[in-house]
Image (spheres, grey):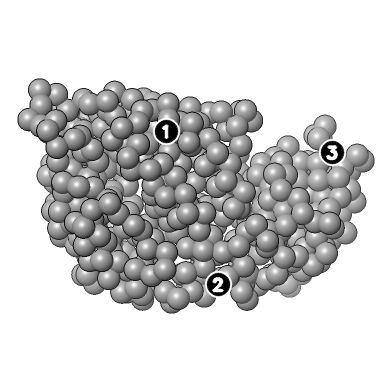
Amino acid sequence: MKNRMKLITAVFCVAASLAAAQETSDPGTVITGARIFDGLSPDLIEGQDVLIQDGMIAAIGAALAPPEGSAVIDANGRVMIPGLSDVHWHVTMAEVPQTTLLTGDAYEIAARAVPTAERTLMRGFTTVRDLGGNSFALKKLIDSGILVGPRMLVAGPPLTQTGGHYDYRLPHDVPADSTMDYWGRTAFFVIGDGDAEVRKRAREIFRMGASQIKIAAGGGVASIFDPLDVRQYSLEEMKAIVDVAESYNSYVAAHVIADEAVRMAVEAGIKSIEHGMLLERETLELMKEKGVWLSTQPLLDDEDRMVFPTAESTKKWLVATAGTEKVYKMAKEIGVKIAFGTDALMDPEMAAKQGKYLSKLEKLGFTPYEALKMATSDNAELMEMAGPRHPYQKGPLGEISVGAYADLILVDGNPLEDLSLVANPEDNFDLIMKNGVIYKNDME
């Protein structure tokens, strides 16, 4: 009886979605012959066609009748997956040399970011959570179709204390009468100290259109003046920023690596820990208890290591990456929610390896299914914490289902069996679609 009811429900859903599809003037696109990874289940869905209309998945069913005038694409057995996402991306910094932050200006950064955005999409990353930099205008122009790039949930300028990870002032710029330097005035990095000032800056960032706030709660690798082990911001300052984010029905993500600093951030109410390579078991257990996400990255001291201009940053890199494998495996064992991101920074060659970093998750103890789910529906769940500040609310991201955004990829091969396919999107991704628009089609 239960199976019969499931069948009746499925038939009803297909009929309802087809009826809705007929009400639109967009004839759309029908993709046939694909094996579908829906972003949720480890089992491929066979024998189902997918109808895309008005940027959304309008229907999924066996032998769908294509609407008059629609385009029909025969996937010919290729695997369809949801568009990938990267929840720790910097479109304005991924390919920008570090020297630009010292000698360049906002116009140079913006000019460099435009091709970066297009290249990101052409690697199959249809959505990014942009966690640092002024990319509001770029997002607006991509969403309006003027420029090409991924969907973006923008955090805007990361908020840092004096001497913190994002204090990029030159050595002789301090002592200073004001912390509002050039990068603060152009909303690239913002320095704030004390309860009143951090509240003001957080409110300004949301006023700019941020989906979520990003702060520095501890020392970093690429920065010059902050040691890796330091705690940044007091508990009271972090609580003030969290209070502002919650007043906007959103949340705070924190750059933080060292265990003590992570623990304080979690106690302050921060919901997304960025990096966290040096976490200990007790803190990870606290994160699970409080529903805090671990948004770490598969950064290792291997052939794809970051290269830094200073010996101090290189030293900090070795300390941080020594904990990467341990924290992934321990977090998975404990059951902490884990997101996928890359944090590609100031290096075009590293940015080009965005898919390769996803494939590295297999070396870190994840099955291809777990890795792909992390980069699709799991990441989408994290981004939904932005609540009403989430700019894409017409349907789900990161899954192939009726009513979801039509962000999808056709892969020449099965990435659920061979995750390395995602490392070479140029050769293996034969079709890339975002919002129902085809940006790459090598189906011939």
Label 1's element?
helix
Label 3's element?
loop
Disc 2 versus disc 3: distance between alpha carbons?
Answer: 35 Å
Q: Quadrant of the C terminus?
A: bottom right
Q: Residues within 10 Å of mark 1 (few under 14, many from 20)?
A: many
Q: Which residue in the structure is indicated by mark 2?
A: 368
Q: Residues within 10 Å of mark 2 (few under 14, many from 20)?
A: many
Residue 121 pos. (x, y %): 59, 46
Task: Inspect the image, locate mark 2, and give the three-letter code of the amino acid beneath it.
Answer: Pro
Label 2's element?
helix
Q: Which residue in the structure is indicated by mark 1?
A: 109
Circle nearer the N terminus (2, 1): 1
Residue 110 pos. (x, y %): 45, 31
Q: Which residue in the structure is indicated by mark 3?
A: 27
Task: Inspect the image, locate mark 1, and give the three-letter code of the amino acid beneath it.
Answer: Ile
Residue 200 quadrant:
top left
Task: Inspect the image, locate mark 3, and give the three-letter code of the amino acid beneath it.
Answer: Pro
Residues under numbered marks 2 and 1 in contact, where contact means CB atoms less than 8 Å apart = no
Residues under numbered marks 1 and 3 in contact, where contact means CB atoms less than 8 Å apart = no
The reply to whether residue 98 is visible in this rendering is yes
Q: Residue at x 33, y 43 (%)?
A: 98
Q: Quadrant of the N terminus?
A: bottom right
